[in-house]
Image: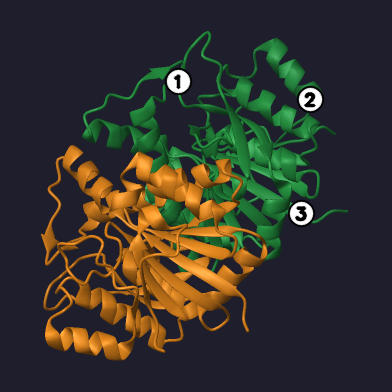
Chain colours: A orange, B green
Amino acid sequence: MSKSLSVIKIGGNVVDSPEALESFLDDFVALTKDRILVHGGGVMASQTLRQMGIEPRMVDGRRITDAETLKVAVSVYAGWLNKTIVAKLQARGCNAIGISGADGGVIEADIRPKKPIDYGFVGDVRSVDVKFLEMLLEQGLTPVICAVTHDGKGTLLNTNADTVASSVAKAMAAVRQVSLVFCFEKNGVLADPEDADSVIPRIDRACFEKMKASGAVSAGMIPKLDNAFAAINAGVHRVIIKNAANLGKTVGTVIKNE
Amino acid sequence: MSKSLSVIKIGGNVVDSPEALESFLDDFVALTKDRILVHGGGVMASQTLRQMGIEPRMVDGRRITDAETLKVAVSVYAGWLNKTIVAKLQARGCNAIGISGADGGVIEADIRPKKPIDYGFVGDVRSVDVKFLEMLLEQGLTPVICAVTHDGKGTLLNTNADTVASSVAKAMAAVRQVSLVFCFEKNGVLADPEDADSVIPRIDRACFEKMKASGAVSAGMIPKLDNAFAAINAGVHRVIIKNAANLGKTVGTVIKNE
């Protein structure tokens, strides 16, 4: 069996809260197997834009990235947030290296088509360089990847952090037994969205189809679960959806085919 | 004889000008030997601070880095500028990797003593991890280093880019024949500061002492030359001071001991 790897994604709720981040990183360094951290950080980018007198623009919850917004997004994601996380991991004895998709040319993306909506400098992942990531891991390094990619022609692109995490997980599945872990603010996929403790411990494809048909899964959760099954179909061993505060615990929802 | 390496430093005059940067990067990728690029970029950091309503504070030409300034400096240096350079090198077929001193723990620094002047989050380099840089070079990667370091305890520090370049050059001299190249806006060390063509092609220690005694070197150039000789005393093969527009040409001032 191939060596295991966890690809762990954290979003704004962890990255933007100093206490949540410190506690998450304590749990992260305690993990014994190889791991890659992927982080978002939209809240700080929006704050910085507003401080600079630029009003963030969103369509359907997705950011419109004009030239000025790209500059701020790359600055905040690849600069402050990425290096803050790396410095904090180094302080904990974890040999982290922070990278964007441009570094080592690791994640190439295509700029999203301008129709029907022009999202600006937003990239859809085209390829992930497995050899480069494998080389870093073999050197004992822990990659910390921010949600910035490039088109290979010199242009940086803002890319959804969930997509970066699942693209990395799917690519690495060629050489590793990959667990893809989405950390968010809830305890997992909930049977009852009003009840934080109603976590469904395990979902397989058949179970998910039944839940969709009966309306037993909230509308917001469907794209997350669709993405999870797409990752599994692409060779990822399992997807785990859990609360960032529970990284060290075997709780949350495990998504597997069998 | 050990393998050669160029450590090339560019400052704001290149990084802040799109045309100068494109032209410099064309010359940079044409170099055939191994190289490390170190970049500053103070102008954009100051602009961003002003856009955010923060007035940059300088004492004796050195930036006072409070918590808010550090955030902007790390964002701009390690984020936008570093990744812009990396993406442009990747587009030219150069396998660049952008790093700060925190990444791979490569450059550790001590926060500068608070007396006589409290510069805030400013670091003086303590150590450079030669093995890490050598590993990147052996993998065919071209390191692009921004002037941000860390203290090993989780704090990022703003660090002078000239100091980062000479610290990297001095450390790498243990395993390589290192040329340290300072690119700036003049053609080299000038015999007559008013005459751009009066470049002194070669300066050795005896010549420099004579120039200092006779006042034949401008006050602003003395610390640069002192640093150059310090690098040579620490094992750097030669230091070159030249115009960034002339990277590909054997012009400028070469500083060597013999």
- In the image, what residue occupies the spot 42% across and 40% down? B74
Disc 3 is placed on an element classified as strand
Would you identify the image quadrant in which residue B192 lies? top right
| Image location of residue A45, percent across then percent down | 26, 48
Task: Residue type at mark 1: give it.
Answer: Gly
- In the image, what residue occupies the spot 21% across and 29% down? B53
Front-lying residue, A134 or B90 = A134
Quarter in which the C terminus of chain B is drawn: top right
| Image location of residue A19, percent across then percent down | 37, 40
Distance CA(mark 3)–CA(mark 2): 23 Å
Residue where numbered disc 2 is placed: B205
Query: Is the residue at mark 3 from the same chain as the one at mark 1?
Result: yes
Looking at the rendered structure, which numbered label has been put on residue B4?
3
Does any portion of residue A49 appear in the rendered image?
yes
Distance CA(mark 1)–CA(mark 2): 27 Å
Task: Residue type at mark 3: give it.
Answer: Ser
Does any portion of residue A146 appear in the rendered image?
no
User: Measured along the vertical axis of the image, is residue A47 above or below residue A239?
Assistant: above
Find out whether the residues at labels 3 and 1 contact each other: C-beta distance under 8 Å: no
Disc 1 is placed on an element classified as loop
Distance CA(mark 3)–CA(mark 1): 34 Å
